[in-house]
Image (spheres, rainbow, N blue to C red):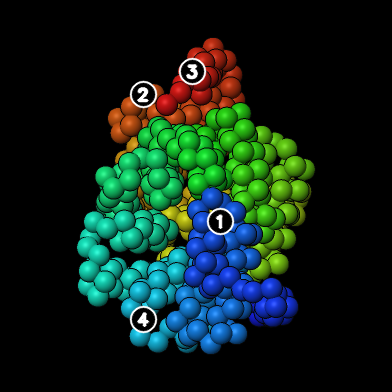
Amino acid sequence: MRSNSGLAVFVGAVVFVAACLCAKGQRPVEDRHAAGQAALDQGDLQKALTEWSFALADAQQGGQSSRLAASQRDLAGLFTTMWRFEDASAALASAKTDAAGDATTQFQIHRIAGELSAATSDLAKANDEIQNAIHMATGTLALGEDHPRTAALYSLLGQVELESEQYAQSNDTLRRAVGVFSETYGPEYVETVVARIRMVRLLLATGRYNEAARQAKRAVDTALKLGPAGRIALGDAWLALGATDLAAHRFDSASNELQHAQVETQAVFGNGLRLVPCLTAYAELYLERGDRSRSLSLASRAWELYQANLPANWLPAVEILRVRARIASGQQSSPDAAAFLDQALNIANRRIHAGSLLAARIIETRGDLAFAAGEIDKAEADYEQAKEARKRMLTPGHPELARSAADSAQVFQRRGNPGVAELVYKDAIQSIESETGNDSFGLIPTLQSYASFLRLEKREREAVEVESRIRRLMGRQE
């Protein structure tokens, strides 16, 4: 991260302005807190930032220790939501110093520390902080397991479990949170949308593309119905829907959805780090479509935002690095591509573990680059390593296992064994059909690979039939 904090400078300026306004009378700190919360609830983060910064300045001037800690906590949470990680850390550290024995503030500090650790990819620390907050919620504060504030913690815990690749636990945790929110507030509630977005990411990770598409559309529709109250989640909802269609190679739909994601994220959060996932997904989309120039522009912008903030070993940086490696390979810059993938693999190994599925995707990309360069033995070794990791962690019929099968098939074809290659393709397709049905969006990438295989083998009629099936799947709505 950057070494200098903007929080002290910003709050210092606010203190000066607040002092100048004293002659006109100050609003009570509680009023500013309420105004900031109301602004946040309506998706106006800049107004919330202004109100809470004034509240902090007023509390500092008035020597109100309890309100001082609460104002610092409010700002820490807001900066975390905005992904201003250094400012969030500074505000949180101050809140911890001034919180004393206030149980409610201590609870909120653990919650925000969990959110900040999750956002910066410190998954072990995030888990500890969230568990501490859950313990306080169900113990000291006696909120109970089914209280919405407890459910919000379970929603966050589900995200941490997802990124740690603990998919079964994440599924149980997220469904529990969605159930509490739905029962308490109904489906049209912003925390329900947030939990549903996390569920979409889990569904994608576990290969359930059709259900992911349904849940993502529901998240977008609900966020739109909520109006201003849904703005804070709308960009992420569009991103989840775009990521679903991108994974299924439904590129036209993905393009429209990712554009919405970028516009909505920029409107609420500005041009900061929160744009990185949108830009990265967009860059991958253009790369898949063969537009390396546009992909490079988007990936470079994402990388610049990352470099300006530099959260250490940040998991979203892995996807930027994978895209940059593929672009560099296409530009005949193999050393750069290898360096990007090494950096990505180091982050994945540090934040998750060496045999993770994220590491497998990076190793597979390394194999793709070796295959494109004609280094078939090297490609095969990487493909096998990725496949073994997937076989350990995924169920049969998962699209990523099918992708590994397609990797093996193209190696067989290149080595002059098309008969074996075709058997591998057909087995992969049948596995997906058996697991998720004949209409699964997860079939599309494997069918596309199979169609390309058939064309290389000069079997045009069969290729046309497969491509017709692909178009039907792409045209389906969930």
Circle 2 residue: 438
Within 10 Å of disc 2 (Cα), the crowding (few <14, some 14-19, many 20+) is some
Q: Secondary structure at mark 2?
A: loop
- The residue under the point 22% across, 69% down is 142
**65 and 339: which one is in front?**
65
| Quarter holding residue 8 | bottom right
Q: Position of residue 79 (x, y in %)?
A: 57, 67
- The residue under the point 50% across, 63% down is 34
Q: Secondary structure at mark 1?
A: helix
- In three-dimensional space, the C-alpha distance between marks 3 and 4, rounded to whole angstroms, equals 59 Å
Whether the residues at callouts 4 and 1 have beta carbons within 8 Å, the answer is no
Q: Position of residue 477 (x, y in %)?
A: 46, 23
- In three-dimensional space, the C-alpha distance between marks 3 and 1, rounded to whole angstroms, equals 45 Å
- The residue under the point 43% across, 55% down is 357
Q: Position of residue 450 (x, y in %)?
A: 50, 28
**199 and 353: which one is in front?**
199
Whether residue 411 can be seen here: no
Mark toward the start of the polypeptide (3 vs 2): 2
In the rendered view, tell whether residue 344 sits above or below residue 326.
below
- In three-dimensional space, the C-alpha distance between marks 4 and 1, rounded to whole angstroms, equals 25 Å
Foreground mark, 3 or 4, reads: 4
Mark 1: amino acid: Ala
Badge number at residue 102: 4
Mark toward the start of the polypeptide (1 vs 2): 1
Mark 4: amino acid: Asp
